[in-house]
Amino acid sequence: MDYRSAGGRYWKIFLDKPFGTGNSSEKRVTFNDIDRYVIISSVSSDVFWWYYSSHFDMFNLGDYQIFGFRLSNLSNLIIERLKEIGKIYEHSLEKNAIIKNVQTGHGIVSQKQYYVRKSKPIIDEIDKVLAKHYGFTEEELDFIINYDIKYRMGDELNEE
């Protein structure tokens, strides 16, 4: 799984492939015993965001923070559903991504910008699956899904 260890503000991007920009903040982490899409969907969830923002500085993301997110004793049903949603989520990220040319101190650089908020309904589905796994109540799930939503969604909350 590939991810960016810095930047991203209120969303962290996790993919099954390299970002392709050669940026030094792009990292790869592997898991031997869990399917990559189970990991991608789980760490892309609002459950992970709550864990990450509650325990860490929100500026840097390291392997130890990802490995510290506990995913154990997953049922086969949960595994299959997270794999399925993880693939849908990654496809949504790519579909909504935009290539932009940005002027930097080193000249013009092309970069792929992901608009994760456009995939929020898929993230909500991931959270529902994780809520079953962790035994969250409806109230706890509602809290997790809406945690930091006004900051994470920005102006989209005001659009009709």
Image (cartoon, rainbow, N blue to C red):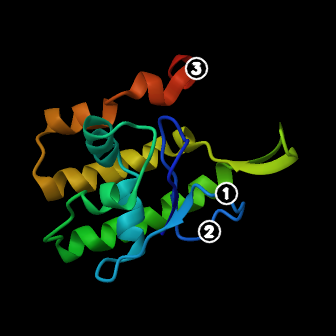
Where is residue 134, by image quadrant? bottom left
Side of 72 where 157 appears, left or right? right
Q: CA distance from mark 1 to mark 3?
A: 33 Å
Sort mark 2 into few (<14), some (14-19) or many (20+) by Cα contacts within 10 Å.
Answer: some
Per the image, the residue denoted by label 2 is: 18
Q: Residue at x 21, y 39 (%)?
A: 141
- Callout 1: SS: loop
| Picture disc at residue 159 | 3
Label 1 near label 2: C-beta < 8 Å? no
Quadrant housing the C terminus: top right
| Picture disc at residue 23 | 1
| Picture disc at residue 73 | none
Side of 82 where 136 appears, left or right? left
Q: Residue at x 44, y 50 (%)?
A: 122
Q: In this picture, is 10 found above or below 34?
A: above
Q: Residue furthest bottom?
A: 32
- Callout 2: SS: loop
Location of residue 53 in the rendering, given as x and y in whole percent from the top left corner? 32, 37
Location of residue 155 in the rendering, given as x and y in whole percent from the top left corner? 57, 20
Residue type pointed to by label 3:
Glu
Q: CA distance from mark 2 to mark 3?
A: 33 Å
